[in-house]
Amino acid sequence: MKILTLNFVTCARKACKASPAAFPLRPREAELEIVEQDINPLFVRNVLPRLEWDALREVCGELGLQQLPSTAPSPDDLFTTTPAAADTAMADAADAHEPRPSQLLRDLHTLLLETTMRSGKLVCGNCGHEYAVKEGIANFLLPSHLV
Amino acid sequence: MDKSSGDGGNVFLVRLVQVYESFRRAELEAIADLLEFKMDILDYNDDSPFCLVRLPSIQNARALISRTIIAHAIYVLWGSGSDYPSLRTSVREQSAHLWAPFAESSFRFEIDSFRGKRSMKEQRSIIESFSWLPLNGPIVMRGAELTLTVFEDWAAGDQKRRSQEQKPDSESQDPESAIASSSLPRPPQPKRLYLGQLIAESGRSHALAKYDLKKRVYVSTTSFAAEIALVTANMAHAAPGRLLYDPLAGTGSLPVACAHFGAMTCGSDIDGRMIRGKGGRRSVVGNFEQYGFKERWLDGWVSDLTNSPLRGLGDEEATRRAGWLDGIVCDPPYGVREGCKTLGKRREERNAVVEGPVYIDGKLSHLLDGYVPPKKPYSFDAMLDDILEFAAVMLVENGRLAMWVPTANENNIALVTPMHPHLELVSECIQSFNKWSRRLLTYRRLRAGEIDRSTKSRKRTYGTGVTANELNSFRKKYFEGFKPTQS
């Protein structure tokens, strides 16, 4: 399960939906891996405003990943229109005006779409229920007494 | 022809495929809406593969056809008529500005007879009847700069009658002299003719070959055929930069189709075996790898629609805001090959055991490896309403839900289309089988300003039955062989 997906899921119990403590789910005993993916700048730009940034910071903290800034970056910071000096000579006129992914976008791509929770548990901060993650796939099915 | 004159863009002929008739118009409209250009459908008939549209530019025509699945190609319309003389008049009088730029281009002619057939001799005669066009370039069969196609639209059965009547002296007849000789009864002729300049072919044949289920590594009995899955993705506005979700993903046929159009996808299923697959490449991830776009599969997880882990549901704050999914695609289980299930215990099981957690050897059973939570049959109608409620909360403004619903083909059963105050029904397409049919319902999530706050979504009551048949009238009818109901 990717770090981005962790930002979209909370406890599956209806009773926990209204509780702020249920989100984000707390990763425990997490085994992480980096799965390289082709960068998708348009998707990162579109998904950025839909993130719960505080929850993302919290999860990164729990997983011992890099410290994120306290506020979400602006979509404008994801692209740079002025290519690096070394590239200018190579790039033709049309290419020079093409927005290029910034280092920030590359870092977000690595964090959100390449960093994967291979196995571990996701724990609800409200009810304490644990959801298992195995081979990258989380299981959110509830036992019948919690439905 | 009146329709082709007038201002504001060019008239194009879309050469549709004569299948899935009720989806064709909806697919074109969905794509024009996604690409944000104005498209007027000037002439469309379920009985014909020739559809005339007005589009602002040739670039729009290329963009439209590049995504269309139920079409072969798009053409600039040079003329139309009810017979060859009127077609030629139409081309001569209205399209000089269209053919003038090709005076020195290499070119070729094609004949496309729908429900008709022309011998080589007839074809030559038809093509030669356009020899007055000032095309001075060389005729080439491959790579021509200009491809002109004569389209013939025959009424059903006319071609057969024509060949029977013409048999005695068919060699001496060509279509021109056949019309001219008034002593003989006039043999049937095409009811409508068009001349079009090829602009671009659709991605249909490439996509259908690529996503053919026979060549897919991981499939199951409920996998969705490539053609109709791709149309579903078009209806849901799958496109680069967007996030689409299938809550009943199975082997991921619909997410794969969405990823074909560049979308990021994710999916879940109540049956973990479907999402995990059978190991190695025989999994949803394996399918994405097979097609060379594994980066478009965000994640798969195991969850139940009515107890979804996705944030936004049940949260008052979130229901006022729009959601974060661009589109939802789903093909709910009809209860025939795959049952409708939700988490929970059947009633008879409930009575048998004590409520609360179950312990095995002093450990909570649901924390043990290999625990399978109990599931119970689910009312199909309740599931459809749950999907709509889910979509209303989770979709962004103008986001789309494309959902398949089965129905029995009975005249005395009114088609029930589930509705939600936050969702507008965009289109309804029907695919008919012998005794049942299924509909693709496409909804748009209304923008905040469009939602009428006064309408409350009504709470329906569903069958209180326990067995699958009691909860799903479609399933019951299917296994009863769709016998007419006594009334």
Image: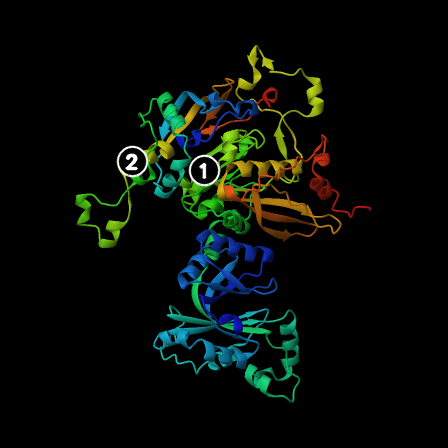
In the rendered structure, the residue with mark 1 lies on which chain? Answer: B
Q: Residue placed at 57% from the left, 61% from the top?
A: B18
Q: How is the image coloured?
A: rainbow
Q: Name the secondary structure under disc 2.
A: helix
Label count reads 2
Q: Amino acid at mark 1?
A: Val
Few, some or many residues within 10 Å of mark 2 (<14, 14–19, 20+): few
The quarter of the picture where residue B146 lies is: bottom left
Q: Amino acid at mark 2?
A: Leu
Q: Could you tell whether B392 is left or right of B198 in the image?
A: right
- The residue that label 1 is drawn on is B285
Few, some or many residues within 10 Å of mark 1 (<14, 14–19, 20+): many
In the rendered structure, the residue with mark 2 lies on which chain? Answer: A
Give above or below for B297 relative to B7.
above
Q: Name the secondary structure under disc 1.
A: helix
Q: Is residue B278 visible?
A: no
Give above or below for B153 relative to B126.
above
Tag 1–tag 2 contact (CB < 8 Å): no
Q: Could you tell whether B11 is left or right of B470 in the image?
A: left
Q: Picture coordinates of residue B393 (x, y %)? A: 53, 36
Are the residues under marks 1 and 2 on the same chain? Answer: no
Q: Residue placed at 45% from the left, 31% from the top?
A: A8
Q: Picture coordinates of residue B368 (x, y %)? A: 53, 18
Q: Picture coordinates of residue B467 (x, y %)? A: 71, 32
- The residue that label 2 is drawn on is A104
Q: Residue B405 bears which disc, if any? A: none
